[in-house]
Amino acid sequence: MKALLLVGGKGTRLRPLTDRRPKPMVPIMGKPLLTRTLYVLKQHGIDEIVLSTCYKSDVIKSYFGDGSQLGLTIHYVDEDFPLGTGGAIKNSAKYFDDSFFVLNADILSNINFTEMLRFHRRKKADVTIAVTRVNDPSAYGVIEFDKDGYALSFREKPQKIISHFINAGVYIFEPGVLAKIPSGRAVSVEREVFPGLLESGRKIAVYKGCNYWMDIGTPEKYIKVHHDGFTGKLQLPEINFRQRSVYSRFNARISGSAILRGPVYLGKGVRIEEGAVVGPGVVIGDNGVIGSGCRVSRSVLWNNVNLTDGSKLTGCIVTDSCRIENISEYRHEIFTPDSTKNINPLAI
Ligand code: GDD
Ligand code: MG
């Protein structure tokens, strides 16, 4: 079975994390978000993948290549200009002649794809959309549906709350639907394609089997997903913090007087110097150096980060290759090599 992943968005709300990497490449405990999704698809027998790319496509292509390292076949469809979510699906049409999955690439969920496909077939739907319940639906696409589980209306980013069920960004399409999407221009699947299909009498089923769901749309959500990984609310295949509170990938050098307070995830070649206290809730990417006397809690450090002796970080994100040189106490800040930005702790 095949899946199309929409990976072309600019990730504007996730800036500055997306200044140098496209959104699907932000790391979630040592692996790009997209790798995590591809693993799960593969477990469900979905091993032929089409990546619909636009923003920073070279970063994605050079990382995944033809997919063989993950045991997948990956095809790329590039856009000269952003075609929107519907335009991207139309643009990839030549790959699909049977039911196929379409996924937004900025979400993590525990959707059971096999079960969703069974549901789609049972409902004899043209499209099935996974929905999830959220408290505040205003940043999402809200879907109303009837008692038999078929969609009645779509409202993208509504001002007024009419339902708490939102589009979870996972669809199954029948290939016949592709003919209904216009080509050569930007099209929104949520605002144009889905409402158009309803108007023309096509059946759109709504699948509710999604217990864990999170979109990584903002830095606050990015932090939240890591909290969920640490508490086990989000299950990550190779990491279970209930079994082991400190995960160290390879070759970490931890001074005898440093203290690790799990849950902590350490990448390859991490060095933690004398008297540093790391954790709880900390990710340190590959080759991170935590200087002596540093205190780091509830923070995510990407690769090659260097903290000067005595720095204190709480609730921070530090992107690749940053050196934090001023000895100070930082709370709820994002560091990139060129900028800093605040995180709103109340939105986590
Ligand atoms: N190829 C391509 N081209 N991909 C795109 C484009 C484009 O022009 N625009 C967006 N994408 C990709 C993004 O990379 C992302 O994976 C997906 O399409 C959705 O775009 P977002 O920009 O993240 O949309 P959103 O978060 O505002 O809303 C969407 O997701 C919500 C769930 O997270 C909608 O589908 C909502 O209805 C939904 O509730
Ligand atoms: Mg999104």
Image: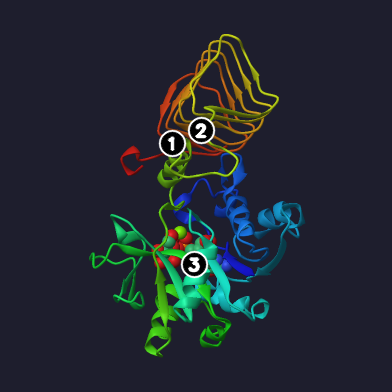
Q: Which of 219 and 335 is in front in this view?
A: 219
Quadrant housing the N terminus: bottom right
Looking at the image, residue 32 sits to the left or right of residue 122; the answer is: right
Give the residue pinned by disc 1: 231
Helix, strand or loop under label 3: helix
What label sits on residue 241 in the rendered view?
A: 2
The disc labelled 1 sits on which kind of residue? Answer: Thr
Q: Earlier in the sequence, mark 2 or mark 3?
A: 3
Give the residue pinned by disc 3: 116
Q: In which quarter of the image is residue 77?
A: bottom right
Q: How far, Cα to Cα, is label 1 from label 2?
A: 7 Å
Q: Which residue lies furthest to the bottom in this view?
A: 200
Q: Which of marks 1 and 3 is nearer the N terminus?
A: 3
Q: Which of marks 1 and 2 is nearer the N terminus?
A: 1
Marks 1 and 2 in Cβ contact (< 8 Å): yes
Q: Nearer the viewer, residue 116 or 264?
A: 116
Q: In which quarter of the image is residue 94?
A: bottom right
Whether residue 22 is visible to the viewer of this picture, yes or no, is: no
The disc labelled 3 sits on which kind of residue? Answer: Met
Helix, strand or loop under label 2: loop
